[in-house]
Amino acid sequence: MKFLYKFTLLIVILIVLGCFVQFVVFNKFFISDTNSLLLSTNEKAAENVSMQLVENLKKVENFLKLVAENDEIRKNQELLNKFNQIVPEVDVVTIVNSKGDILRMSGNVHNPNVSNLAYRDYFQKAIHGKTYISNVFTSTSGNKIVVMSVPILKNGAIDGVVVGTVKLQGNSLASMFDNKEFGKKGYISVLDSNGYVVYHPNKERIGKKSVIFDKLQGKLGFKIMKDYSGKDQFVGFSKVSNLNWYVTVITPTADIMTIRNIIIYETFIGSIIVSVLVILLGIYTIKRYSKPLNKLIFSFNALKDGKYKKIDPHDYEEEFQEMVKVYNNTIGRLEEAHNDLEEAADIDSLTGAYNRRAFNNFLSIVKQEINNCSLKSLGILLLDIDHFKELNDTAGHLAGDNVLKKLAQIMKATAGERSVFRFGGDEFAVVIRNVSDERLLSVAEEIRIKSEAALNGCTVSIGMAKFPKDTHSVDELIDFADKALYISKKSKNKVTVFIKSSDS
């Protein structure tokens, strides 16, 4: 019953640790990864919308240039009206002569209060030969507008200006963005070079100074910022080419936090339910099998002292018969292998690990076990020390010997003394019976990480292969691990798991 109490206590400890991981580690990584993912997603979306805005502005520019190049369109009001309907983004098209006098207008005209535009910046820019896009300003009729102007060339001289006006609080510009969705409440905002809002789904914000404009730096990026309401937002932004405008894609953080909390609570409740079921099942199982298991554990512990004693299968229930049979078969082979190792002195004198001869003898035993179907699984790690030759050349062979000893100690402490073999030079092997893929990879990573910290500037590259997942042949298993090691050596300080290709 002592084993039962210990096992139950272990389960309780694991549950407590699991809860700690749920509420601390998982929570931390979830927030970090989710923030990074959403911010980078918003950044990419802002870049895409920025390119779309440039394309739409280019479309408007080409339309205005076409009007500027065609006398017939400029002089025929009916033709100008029909032509203006082709580009819905432009609310008003105005034809202006070289003195700034308005000659003709088309579109949503509401009794203009001025007849001359000579003093306007967009007229002055265009009359000097430049295509110009203005920032946000208020027209004489009180509308928030953006203006694009292009010069009219006639016989090589500038004869006037074509002006396209976009009313920001209308439907023209909104049609570019209103169909864009970013999460549940995400939206697009476009700011001019002074930080005034060109587009916002809330039309009351158009023409007002953006609270995040001063924090936008560079051509592309993402940040967590507070919006005009003081709430945190995920903001991805992209500067519009040649305009110094910014396109921002904004997603409220509140929705993400709600989803995160739901996931955490669901995971926690599920973990509690599963843990309770595991405890109940574990208690039932241990009560039924604790006695025979204790006997088996005692017998396995005796192996540490080199006592290879077989056990009587008649003392065990039927479901333990196969386990006892495998144990007794293993004991017989271990006795033979142990005697062979002692007789051949198969210990490497420098590192204390088994040498290549011991490894070969071990493989012979493994092959027999595979043939007898008594071996469930086998994992092999092949290791090679990175930068070992440089260490020997610069610090001397004594330093190299110390690195070999330290690595052997790390491997023994991690995988067990009977699992470590030295091939010679700076090459080693770790072989573990009946190990899961996850445990084998964990052992490899632990050796790599400890080596990086302890080997005087050297690291280890590791190749990993598994029986029977990768192959049923021991020789192939070593070859596969060696191929994985070769891949690790390319970048060094790496664990590579062998993956069998379709043509292997």
Image (spheres, helix red, strand yellow):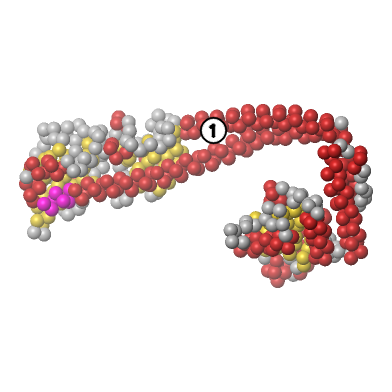
Q: Main secondary structure of the magenta part?
A: helix
Q: Position of residue 30 (x, y in %)?
A: 56, 38
Viewer-side residue, 257 vs 299: 299
The residue located at (39%, 40%) in the rendering is 249
Q: Position of residue 275 (x, y in %)?
A: 70, 31
Q: Quadrant of the C terminus?
A: bottom right
Is residue 446 within the magenta segment?
no
Residue, disc 1: 260
The residue located at (42%, 44%) in the rendering is 43
Viewer-side residue, 396 vs 347: 347
Tell whether 135 sits left or right of 480: left
Viewer-side residue, 72 vs 303: 303
On screen, 166 above or below 155? above
Q: Position of residue 469 (x, y in %)?
A: 68, 53
Q: Quadrant of the N terminus?
A: top right
Mark 1 surroundings within 10 Å by alpha-carbon count, few (fewer than 14), some (14 through 19), many (20 or more): some
Q: Position of residue 296 (x, y in %)?
A: 87, 42
Q: Which residues are magenta?
A: 64-70
Residue type pointed to by label 1? Arg
Is residue 66 within the magenta segment?
yes
Tell me if residue 289 can be seen.
yes
